[in-house]
């Protein structure tokens, strides 16, 4: 089993952000505002209602690390 690197780079976080907000699908539309610190905030339009979502850098890094660990464990 490979050792998981606990230090996730800011570039990896930004790439994950870009993939997250680049998804386009009906009826969801994302409007993104990526900040310099790696956090992401966006609005999602879902069936005519607008939802403002804010995800901190820590949330993104935690989810990425969990996903990476689960992938390596397989």
Image (spheres, grey):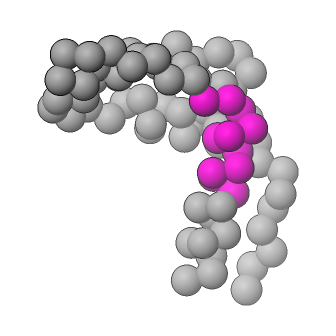
Quick check: 72 left or right of 50? right
Q: In the rendered view, tell whether residue 31 sits above or below residue 70.
A: above
- From the viewer's side, name the closer residue of 28 and 5: 28
Q: Is residue 8 above or below residue 53?
A: below
The verdict on residue 1 being magenta is no
Image point (67%, 69%), residue name: 69
Q: Percent x, y for residue 22?
A: 37, 30
Hey, which quadrant is residue 46 in on the image? top left
- Compared with residue 2, is residue 31 higher up or lower down, i.e. above or below? above
- Quarter of the image where one finds residue 2: bottom right
Task: Quarter of the image for the N terminus: give it.
Answer: bottom right
Compared across the picture, whether 19 is left or right of 60 comes to left
> Does the stretch in magenta take in 60?
yes
- Of residue 66 and residue 9, the one placed in the foreground of this image is 66
* Magenta-highlighted residues: 55-65
Depth check: 53 or 57 in front? Answer: 53
* Rendered residue at 50%/23% (across/down): 53
Q: Main secondary structure of the magenta part?
A: helix
């Amino acid at each position: 089993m490979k050792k998981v690197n606990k230090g996730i780079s800011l570039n990896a976080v930004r790439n994950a952000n870009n993939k997250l907000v680049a998804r386009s699908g009906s009826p969801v539309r994302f409007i993104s505002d990526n900040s310099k610190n790696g956090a992401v905030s966006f609005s999602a339009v879902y069936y005519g209602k607008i939802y403002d979502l804010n995800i901190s850098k820590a949330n993104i890094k935690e989810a990425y690390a969990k996903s990476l660990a689960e992938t390596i464990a397989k």
